[in-house]
Image (cartoon, helix red, strand yellow):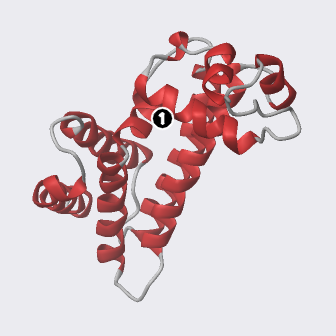
């Protein structure tokens, strides 16, 4: 006897998000549909529409969780008894470690582009960037230009984009991450 399909009452947003997350990691946004998510959950696609109005809304819920996780990582590195330079180093390492330990998620957050979802993903990325910029600004010993902070972010992003798929996780690139983070600290400290 096959397992009973979850009814609208049994189906939760979390179940939908978890299944959609699996699919978004392995397929392009356009290859996924409400029907494909429902099929894997063993329910009707109408049951999913009870919780989400469309696929983009599910995607945004997933992205919001990813950005919250990244922001928490950055905020955790702001706390503690360390001096400002050590905290700044930890913020940079934390960003790169997050990207390398969560490569599929990072791609969805910062690399994948699709007209249907760009507005939603860009909004979440901008909010996360603002938190990053505020962290860097508050930890810097000197007053930084907006362009300094933006260039630092692009350098961190470029590092993750370059190493993704070449390493499985942060541990495999730890030495390079540390060297890059220290280089960025030095660049911010000795700028003209």
Quarter of the image for residue 48 reads top right
**Rendered position, 118 above or below 6:** above
> Which residue is at a point 44% across and 39% down the rendered structure image?
105
Which percent across, then down, holds residue 61? 67, 38
Residue at 32% across, 51% down: 101
Q: Quadrant of the N terminus?
A: top right
Q: Is residue 60 above or below residue 71?
A: above
The x, y position of residue 5, in whole percent, is 75, 30
Left/right placement of residue 179 relative to residue 100 reads left
Q: How many marks?
A: 1
Q: Is residue 149 visible?
A: yes
Judge the density around disc 1: few (<14), some (14-19), many (≥20) Cα neighbours within 10 Å. Answer: many
Residue linked to disc 1:
109
Position of 141 relative to 121 (above/below) = below
Provide the secondary structure element on which disc 1 rests. Answer: helix
Question: Residue at point 31% right, 47% down?
Answer: 152
As drawn, the residue found furthest toward the bottom would be: 81
Foreground of the two, 185 or 103: 103
**Left-right relation of 25 to 89:** right
Q: Residue at x 53, y 46 (%)?
A: 66
- Residue 192 visible in the displayed image: no
Residue 124, how many percent across, how many down?
60, 38
Image position of 187 (left or right of 176): right
- Quarter placement of the C terminus: bottom left
* Residue that extends furthest to the front in the rendered view of this protein: 1
In the picture, residue 167 is in which quadrant?
A: top left
């Amino acid at each position: 006897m096959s397992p009973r399909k979850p009814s609208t009452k049994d189906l939760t947003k979390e179940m939908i998000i978890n299944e959609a997350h699996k699919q978004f990691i392995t397929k392009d946004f356009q290859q996924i549909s409400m029907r494909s998510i429902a099929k894997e959950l063993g329910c009707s696609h109408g049951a999913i529409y009870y919780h989400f109005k469309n696929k983009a809304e599910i995607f945004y819920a997933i992205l919001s969780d990813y950005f919250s996780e990244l922001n928490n990582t950055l905020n955790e590195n702001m706390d503690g008894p360390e001096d400002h330079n050590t905290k700044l180093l930890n913020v940079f390492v934390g960003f790169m470690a997050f990207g390398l330990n969560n490569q599929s998620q990072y791609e969805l957050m910062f690399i994948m582009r699709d007209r249907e979802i760009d507005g939603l993903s860009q909004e979440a990325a901008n909010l996360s960037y603002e938190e990053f910029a505020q962290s860097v600004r508050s930890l810097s010993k000197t007053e930084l230009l907006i362009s300094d902070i933006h260039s630092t972010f692009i350098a961190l992003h470029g590092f993750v984009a370059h190493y993704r798929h070449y390493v499985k996780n942060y541990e495999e690139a730890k030495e390079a991450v540390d060297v890059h983070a220290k280089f960025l600290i030095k660049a911010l400290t000795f700028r003209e």
